[in-house]
Image (cartoon, rainbow, N blue to C red):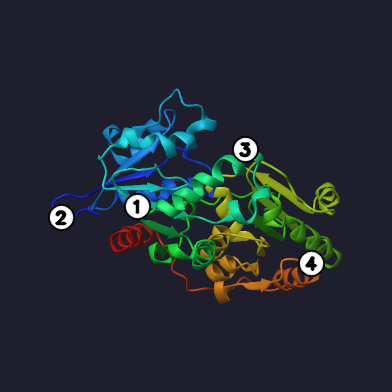
Amino acid sequence: MPTDRARPVRWLLMAGHVPQDLRGGGIVRYTVELARALQRRDDVELHLLTSQQAAGSLAELTGSEERIVRLPARVPDPLVPAFERSLLSRTLASRFDVVQGAKHLLPRSVAARTVLTVHDMLLFDRPADFPLPKRTLLRRPYAGALRQAGTLLCVSAATRTRLTQWAPELAARTAVVPLATSPQLLSSAATPVDGLACKTFGLVVGDSSPRKNLAVAVSAWAQVIEQRPDAVLALVGPPAWGVEAYGPDHARLVASGHVVQLTGVDDGTLRWCYENAAVVLAPSLAEGFGLPAVEALDLGAPLITSLDPALVEVSGSDADHLRADDVPAWADAVLRHLSAPRPTRDRQPRTWDDVAAETVAAVSST
């Protein structure tokens, strides 16, 4: 970090993975919200590394086209990670005080303080969850970036524990900076879902990959409807991107209307789902943070999670915690919530200004 207090820190946030519409999964949302919060700070001059297509949209986050660094148009998407790791430093030279990788990578040999956000260690712990090209081409560069970074920002203490188990020598360079619910989600007008508006329903938010363990939630629901045939399970997530794992009861429950799938919903629809669900289920086998659990609690929903350390960490005593493979226990817990009033919590949501402040402080101190 510079010692010259007369000017703000020139901070480059790598956002080449952010699409033109600024929408996407958890890492996209992290990058966009952190950019907005950093831009609000007087001590940071935010710059963004972007694709050619997203440059215009992301320039609005910085307030100036001059603060956009574009990836070369001639680099095809599959080769962007290799470019960012091996060739980007030539483009950056010594223009920035801080270069932050928001998704797995940092430019090698860059003349700046390097910061890497560690969302999880799943590329090492669960490589089979990823398409072959990604796990083949990304693991070594990710490992190199982890060892290179001057500051490693772990999104949870659970992720920091896993990182330091993988490489104990990195402990002194780590800090925990938890995530926050999107302000757009908290402020959007709730939009009812026609097929759920008059029904008692449970909610799962996340993709359909094996790690998310949807099969347990769906199989538990098959037991739930034996006592509550009016109950519906809503599965909200992105379009499938790999192997899906819904379990043996899925097709039957979809056909009977007891499972409803919603894809690509907007913030208003997601907010309504959280605010009207009788219970939210987070049965995941492994998480780096577990943002849907925090979103559920911030919007007042009852919550059941697995015993995954990150999910237990972010939800604490505000949720029930069950073994990820205990289908009867999940069914019993759901039935209790279906018969109980929604809890009243005095909860002040964490903000992205908090995330930005802790990010800047961590970079200054490590």
Q: Does 352 sit above or below residue 323?
A: above
Question: In the depicted view, which residue is nearer to us: 213 or 109?
Answer: 109
Asked whether, in this view, residue 325 is left or right of residue 147, the answer is right
Which numbered dot is residue 327? Answer: 4
In the picture of the structure, the residue carrying the numbered disc 2 is 5
In the picture of the structure, the residue carrying the numbered disc 3 is 133
Residue at the extreme top of the image, as rendered: 74
Observer-side mark, 1 or 2, equals: 2
Question: In the depicted view, which residue is nearer to us: 181 or 110?
Answer: 110
Q: Amino acid at mark 2?
A: Arg
Q: Amino acid at mark 3?
A: Pro
Observer-side mark, 2 or 3, equals: 3
Q: Secondary structure at mark 4?
A: helix
Q: Are marks 3 and 4 in contact (CB under 8 Å)?
A: no
Can residue 58 be seen here? no
Mark 1 Cα shell of 10 Å, populated few (<14), some (14-19), many (≥20)? some
Mark 4 Cα shell of 10 Å, populated few (<14), some (14-19), many (≥20)? many
